[in-house]
Image (tube, rainbow, N blue to C red):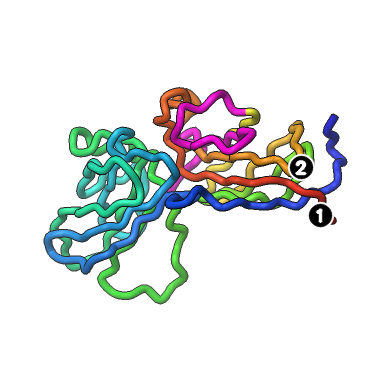
Amino acid sequence: MAKDDDPPLKVIEDTPPKGSLANFKITACSDVTPSGVTLQLEGLAGNNPELYKNTIAVFSGVGPSPSQEPEKVVAITKSSMPNRFDLEFAFGPSDYSLTYQVAGAGNADPSVGLETMCAVAFIYKFPMAAAAPITNVSMTIRAATASSLKVQYFVLPNYDPVKYQNWIGIWEGTPNANSALPEPTYTANVSSSSNVGFVSLKNLNLYTDFPYTMIYFMAPRSSGLGTGDTKAGAVLYFSLADEGA
């Protein structure tokens, strides 16, 4: 049985399936014009943006938050990722933020789903000299034993993981984050309102040389696990090995 004094294990982070990322990413792949911009959208394996009502929101300034009213929200009418998406918007001579949501109602109700924003791209009037802020949700394992994990998470600035009931789940094997997932083997709620923090998982029984999948969710546990509409914001594929291996 795993114990709290188990020796530390080496964490091996594995790459996502070909053609996908471990999180979501927005990149402008055309010049920004007064009428819009073409975006490259990348994300988790199996995500269907149109089916799961993914959206892009446009905010004035460079500090978007789910409680801020966006200038515009548009539904993504693409069924797979990566894809290119033409965003029509009358950009003015100021700074803007473009956020990616894994839930929403598009133009029907711009406020729906903003709490699932998991990636951002900035459009600056002038180039920024300061260090770039966090632009997507991600996770990394900082310490591991057979019975515990210390996970560091990163979400967007001005985002409160506690308010929006974010949580982490772990599955044995390599399930698709946007499939009809069974109940997770282990779970933990994010208990800090900081956009960078730690989640400790204890009383685990983990094996070495065995694949695991960790998923970060942007919505409460009742949301869509059995349907594929999981509102996952990031994924981490990993395995554990003895330190001397």
Element class at badge 1: loop
Q: Is residue 166 magenta?
A: yes
Evaluate if marks 1 and 2 touch, with contact meaning CB atoms under 8 Å apart: yes
Q: Is residue 8 above or below residue 210?
A: below
Q: Extreme front residue here? A: 18
Q: Which mark is residue 66?
A: none
Write down the quadrant of residue 66 in the picture. top left
What's the magenta bit mostly, secondary-structure-wise? loop
- Helix, strand, or loop for circle 2? loop
Q: Quadrant of the N terminus?
A: top right
Give the answer, above or below, for where 152 lies relative to 127: above
Q: Is residue 102 visible?
A: yes
The residue at the point 54 percent across, 24 percent down is 182
Q: Residue at x 19, y 33 (%)?
A: 108
**Residue 112 seen in the current view:** no
Q: Position of residue 97 (x, y in %)?
A: 30, 57
Residue found at x 69% / y 37%: 201
Residue holding disc 1: 245
Q: CA distance from mark 1 to mark 2?
A: 10 Å
First along the sequence among labels 1 and 2: 2
Q: Which mark is residue 208?
A: 2
Residue 57 percent across, percent down from the top left: 27, 48
Which residue is pictured at 23% across the width and 66% down the height?
A: 30
What is the three-letter code of the residue carrying label 2? Thr
The magenta-colored residue range is 157-184
Q: How many marks?
A: 2
Residue 75, given in percent of the width and then of the height, sits at: 23, 41
Q: Quadrant of the C terminus?
A: bottom right
Place of residue 159 in the rendered image (x, y in percent of width and height, measured from the top left): 44, 46
232 part of magenta stretch: no
**Residue type marked 1:** Ala
